[in-house]
């Protein structure tokens, strides 16, 4: 056996031992392990990956190990949303068996959809949902602060590191709008960063901190969303706050409601004129609207199961749907890639979530998902935003199926709760 072969064997053994050690650690310290996964989501670019038979990104790899440790725990009661989600995953992935689904799309279902959803669904078995909200709020407040720093200084450090490969070649370049470089953080795309921050904003409303701390965290995240110059992300962040103010129940939310209303008014007064001026100078609004409207012409080509008949692969390996190289609407992309049945199941789950919100029975994660509708209509699930969205969806299902009613006590956070949260962050 040559030296290089021996090195590969040793590297493989080390990787297996490291994976086993992390799984044991996650079993013993699930909060710390989930926090580590959130840090990977927030700060490790998608192009940092391990190449096995298929490339596995760091966020998916760590997620698989964490999910394996969580599956050992006694499951909570299951409900209709679990059944619909399981049926969704089966319907989306089964066309692979008859050649109606590409391998990369199947890998997306298994290593992104299922892993992200599973983490969100099972993590509340090992820790309080409010602790998870707090962890997301702290991590993404740092993300928001770094996004502001990136926008002000032009420093794109989180987007400039990692290996050079085909994935980094796609996502590493920095976007511009109106002559301004947009913040991307480690997310590889300004929309992915902004949309992820928008989901975190909705969870931060119910995080286990004093009202002034929550308002400060949300303010930093809103500033981070603004620096992405993404219309969909800004609308989703504002919508998430508005829905939380109007429909979320509990004493803790009541105490922060006036502060959040004031924050929205200040943000509108400070950021809205600048944001609208940049959009006007970029002159992209009409073109973007026309492009997204033209995507509707692809709907007749959607099959019941599997990928659309409009799919074409060029001699260079590029994928097209009709004349479109990219599909900037995740709902349309669900149908084109996985079929009408998959799209119908996704829409059913979204309608159930909307109904919960309007009946004032929704939890923060459900509001975060509903507030993503503007993004799902106008952008695709990409990079870490993809798996983070499914994580929030899993949290929403776990919270809605939980037998605990929405009550004053469920939203009350004492000093001991905050101290416990801080103690388990380390």
Image: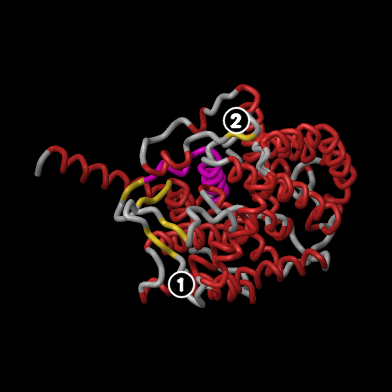
Q: Can residue 207 be seen?
A: no
Q: Which residue is mark 1?
A: 306
Quadrant, the C terminus: top right
Q: Is residue 325 above or below residue 46?
A: below
The count of marks equals 2
Q: Can residue 282 be seen?
A: yes
Q: Which residue is mark 2?
A: 181
Crowd class of label 2 (few under 14; some 14 to 19; many from 20; radius 10 Å): many
Residue 389 percent location from the top left of the image: 59, 55
Q: Is 121 displayed left or right of 98 in the figure?
A: right
Q: Is residue 49 above or below residue 87?
A: above
Direction top: furthest residue: 153
Residue at 44% over, 64% down: 311
Residue 305 percent location from the top left of the image: 48, 76
Q: Nearer the viewer, residue 222 or 335?
A: 335
Residue 44 percent location from the top left of the image: 49, 39
Between discs 1 and 2, the one toward the N terminus:
2
Write down the quadrant of residue 356 in the picture. bottom right
Q: Is 191 displayed left or right of 400 in the figure?
A: left
Write down the quadrant of residue 104 in the picture. bottom left
Residue 147 in the magenta stretch? The answer is no
Instruction: Point out the stretch of residues depicted in magenta.
Output: 30-49
Q: Is residue 198 above or below residue 267?
A: below
Question: CA separation, marks 1 and 2?
Answer: 38 Å
Instruction: Check whether the beta carbons of the residues at disc 1 and disc 2 lie within 8 A of each other.
Output: no
Residue at 53% over, 44% down: 41
Residue 166 percent location from the top left of the image: 37, 43
Quadrant, the N terminus: top left
Residue at 77% over, 40% down: 214
Q: Nearer the viewer, residue 304 or 257?
A: 304
Judging from the image, what secondary structure is the residue with disc 1 in? loop
Q: Main secondary structure of the magenta part?
A: helix
């Amino acid at each position: 056996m040559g030296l290089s072969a021996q090195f590969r064997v040793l590297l493989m053994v080390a990787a297996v031992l490291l994976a086993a050690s992390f799984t044991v650690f996650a079993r013993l310290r699930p909060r710390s392990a989930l926090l580590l996964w959130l840090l990977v989501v927030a700060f490790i670019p998608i192009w940092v990956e391990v190449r096995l038979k298929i490339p596995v990104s760091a966020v998916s790899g760590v997620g698989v190990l964490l999910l394996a440790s969580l599956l050992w725990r006694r499951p909570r009661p299951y409900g209709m949303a679990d059944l619909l989600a399981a049926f969704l995953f089966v319907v989306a992935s089964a066309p692979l068996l008859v050649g109606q689904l590409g391998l990369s799309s199947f890998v997306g279902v298994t290593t992104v959809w299922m892993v992200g959803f599973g983490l969100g669904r099972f993590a509340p078995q090992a820790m309080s949902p409010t602790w998870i909200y707090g962890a997301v709020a702290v991590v993404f407040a740092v993300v928001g602060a770094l996004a502001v720093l990136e926008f002000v200084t032009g420093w794109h450090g989180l987007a400039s590191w990692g290996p050079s490969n085909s994935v980094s070649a796609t996502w590493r370049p920095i976007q511009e709008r109106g002559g301004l470089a947009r913040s991307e953080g480690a997310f590889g795309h300004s929309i992915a960063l902004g949309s992820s921050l928008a989901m975190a904003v909705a969870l931060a409303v119910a995080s286990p901190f004093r009202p002034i701390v929550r308002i400060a965290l949300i303010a930093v995240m809103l500033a981070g969303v603004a620096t992405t110059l993404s219309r969909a992300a800004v609308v989703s962040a504002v919508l998430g706050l508005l829905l939380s103010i109007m429909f979320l129940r509990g004493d803790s939310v009541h105490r922060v409601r006036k502060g959040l209303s004031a924050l929205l008014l200040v943000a509108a007064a400070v950021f809205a004129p600048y944001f609208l001026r940049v959009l006007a100078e970029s002159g992209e609004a009409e073109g973007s609207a026309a492009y997204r409207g033209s995507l509707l012409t692809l709907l007749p080509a959607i099959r019941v199961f599997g990928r659309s008949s409009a799919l074409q692969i060029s001699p260079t390996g590029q994928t097209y749907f009709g004349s479109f190289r990219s599909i900037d609407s995740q709902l349309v992309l669900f149908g084109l890639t996985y079929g009408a049945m998959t799209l119908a199941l996704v829409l059913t789950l979204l309608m159930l979530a909307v109904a919960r919100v309007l009946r004032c029975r929704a939890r923060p994660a459900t509001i975060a998902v509903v507030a993503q509708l503007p993004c799902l209509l106008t952008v695709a699930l990409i990079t870490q935003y993809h798996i983070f969205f499914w994580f929030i969806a899993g949290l929403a299902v776990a919270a809605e199926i939980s037998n605990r009613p929405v009550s004053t006590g469920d939203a009350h956070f004492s000093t001991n709760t905050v101290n416990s949260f801080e103690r388990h962050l380390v």
